[in-house]
């Protein structure tokens, strides 16, 4: 079933359109930046963009910062919201269940396909961004191709490891949204409602994180530690926020998956 | 093959299926009739484990459902409430995906089985067009092909001829009859009486969630106690049968009499020529209309 889900994902035009859009936005930013050379001031969002002007190899990190706040969660929410509700609205859900595919198994296969999509999308974004960055901006040659935010030079090996860490962290950060969308997807037969519901949760979380008065709940919000991967480029790496971020995502995934499973396993399938 | 006892499904305050004791024997061609909204589809969903019963027992192929769902369903082919497919994929790709999703579909024989199923339903020459470009009839055929993919022992078909033209309906009927002769049990739900009349050997009628009639079709078509006689000598026949003729339409008479052969002898003895004579029987339509109360899609003032 897992193989089937992955095949469905790969053969779906929408998968590739969304990935093309995800890779397209940073590329567009890079083109503007390379032609105008007007970079954001240091410390402004998105992170790393100012540094890219002098070192193109940093662009993968900047690209992650560009797609992270909106593009990436939107595409993950759309794919996850479609997981069960999409099968229900097309009528395929009943044929899968009488095939028979166990309900738990179907849900697990959907989750694995979702995780694969997320990781693949983030990897492709970083990959295209590296190519674009090296082509459009001056790349610093030699061993110390990059410096950390703290100013200490990094070797190529260290830099690649930190980019890989950032890719992994961003992908994991998306799983919380994915789990919420997957849960909503088992509640409704409309893929759109499920995706929008998850996005609503996300926007609410981002508003509360930015609100000082909501400081008491902000450590428990899914988007609170989304930017913690930037810490991976400091030297030495402050692990605290990264660890908390991973833990929060794990809690969201476990809670919403359990809810999705409990709902779906006992649900009357009427579509 | 299928037995249910006291099967009940309640949605909130509505009893969609109410104490149904369904009994489908091995090799039956069972027709499930009933007005729209009488619970046919919910009953089928209950049988297949899509919807969970409020109370009652289901046995499919000798095993309890939905507990033994994994062992039972690979041997069941289904078409529930219209066919479904991934619109952006071809028919073949759709069949391949569904077959690969569950147990009992060997990978090595998959391509051959898909070709055979498509051939059977009349889609043997189908190209790589995506399903979204298919007509309603083609989708219906594809749905049946999916149901036939693993040579099921039991076929559960909900409104199988939806969207087919008269020739397609005829083809489907012949295909289903052929499958049944080869040993496949059929459970077909329909609101089309003629479809069930021509295909099935056994009939169940649902009304407001209850199974109000369940019998062999021949047993339901009971004699009405009248004999239909066609004769060119109408006036003489009426004179002879004085008072026993209920209806007269041109050369056709309906006579109250228990036995066609005896009536025939009586008429011939009197020198009356008989063109055609047979016992009038209740039609399936009369049985169904007498047993059911009305369509759930009709809303009357109360």
Image: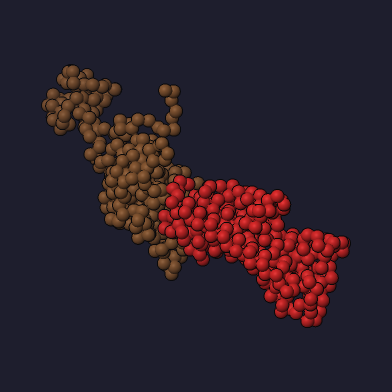
Instruction: Pinpoint residue A54: horizontal percent, then vertical percent.
Output: 84, 70
Q: Between B271 and A111, which is closer to the camera in this rendering?
A: A111
Quadrant of the rendered image containing residue A79: bottom right
Q: How many marks?
A: 0
Q: Is residue B301 above or below residue B200?
A: above
Colour assignment, chain A: red
Instruction: Pinpoint residue A115: horizontal percent, then vertical percent.
Output: 58, 63
Residue occupying image coordinates x 58% and y 49%: A194
Quadrant of the rendered image containing residue B217: top left
Q: Between A121 and B176, which is closer to the camera in this rendering?
A: A121
Q: Is residue B93 left or right of residue B206?
A: right
Q: Is residue A84 left or right of residue A120?
A: left
Instruction: Pinpoint residue A126: horizontal percent, then vertical percent.
Output: 70, 68
Q: Between B261 and A227, which is closer to the camera in this rendering?
A: A227
Colour assignment, chain B: brown
Residue occupying image coordinates x 16% and y 20%: B240
Q: Between B209 and B32, which is closer to the camera in this rendering?
A: B209
């Amino acid at each position: 079933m897992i193989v089937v889900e992955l095949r469905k994902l790969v053969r779906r035009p929408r998968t590739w359109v969304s990935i093309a859009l995800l890779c397209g936005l940073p590329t567009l930013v890079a083109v503007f930046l390379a032609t105008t050379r007007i970079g954001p001031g240091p410390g402004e969002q998105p992170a790393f963009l100012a540094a890219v002007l002098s070192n193109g190899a940093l662009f993968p990190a900047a690209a992650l910062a560009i797609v992270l706040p909106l593009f990436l969660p939107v595409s993950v929410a759309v794919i996850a919201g479609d997981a069960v509700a999409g099968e229900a609205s097309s009528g395929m859900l009943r044929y899968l269940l009488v095939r028979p595919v166990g309900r738990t198994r179907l849900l697990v296969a959907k989750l694995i396909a979702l995780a694969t999509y997320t990781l693949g999308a983030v990897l492709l974004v970083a990959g295209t961004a590296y190519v674009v960055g090296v082509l459009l901006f001056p790349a610093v040659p030699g061993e110390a191709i990059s410096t950390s935010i703290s100013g200490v030079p990094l070797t190529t090996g260290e830099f690649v490891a930190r980019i890989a860490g950032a890719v992994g962290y961003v992908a994991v950060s998306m799983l919380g949204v994915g789990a919420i969308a997957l849960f909503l997807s088992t509640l409704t037969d409309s893929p759109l409602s499920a995706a929008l519901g998850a996005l609503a949760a996300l926007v609410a979380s981002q508003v509360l994180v930015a609100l000082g008065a909501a400081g008491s709940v902000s450590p428990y919000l899914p988007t609170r530690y989304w930017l913690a991967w930037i810490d991976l480029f400091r030297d030495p790496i402050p692990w605290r926020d990264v660890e908390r971020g991973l833990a929060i995502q794990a809690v969201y995934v476990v809670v919403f998956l359990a809810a999705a499973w409990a709902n779906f396993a006992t649900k009357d399938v009427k579509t | 093959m299928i037995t249910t006892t006291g099967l009940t499904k309640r949605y909130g305050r509505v009893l969609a299926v109410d104490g149904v004791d369904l009994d489908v024997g091995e090799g039956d061609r069972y027709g499930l009739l009933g007005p729209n909204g009488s619970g046919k589809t919910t009953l089928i969903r209950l049988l297949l484990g899509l919807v969970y019963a409020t109370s009652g027992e289901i046995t499919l192929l000798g095993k309890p459902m939905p507990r033994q769902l994994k062992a039972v369903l690979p041997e069941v082919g289904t078409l529930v409430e219209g066919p479904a497919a991934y619109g952006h994929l071809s028919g073949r790709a759709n069949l391949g995906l569904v077959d690969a999703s569950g147990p009992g579909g060997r990978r090595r024989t998959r391509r051959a089985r898909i070709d055979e199923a498509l051939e059977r339903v009349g889609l043997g020459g189908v190209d790589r067009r995506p399903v979204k470009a298919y007509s309603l009839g083609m989708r219906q055929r594809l749905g049946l092909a999916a149901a036939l993919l693993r040579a099921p022992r039991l076929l559960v078909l909900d409104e199988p001829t939806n969207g087919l033209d008269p020739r397609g309906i005829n083809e489907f009927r012949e295909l289903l009859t052929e499958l049944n002769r080869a040993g496949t049990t059929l459970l077909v739900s329909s609101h089309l009486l003629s479809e069930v009349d021509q295909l099935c050997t056994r009939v169940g009628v649902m009304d407001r969630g209850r199974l109000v009639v369940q019998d062999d079709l021949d047993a339901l078509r009971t004699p009405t106690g009248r004999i239909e006689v066609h004769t060119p000598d109408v006036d003489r026949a009426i004179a002879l049968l004085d008072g026993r003729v209920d209806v007269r339409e041109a050369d056709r008479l309906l006579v109250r009499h228990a036995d066609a052969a005896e009536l025939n002898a009586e008429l011939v003895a009197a020198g009356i020529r008989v063109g055609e004579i047979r016992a009038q029987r209740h039609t399936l339509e009369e049985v169904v209309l007498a047993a059911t109360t009305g369509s759930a899609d009709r809303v009357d003032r109360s």
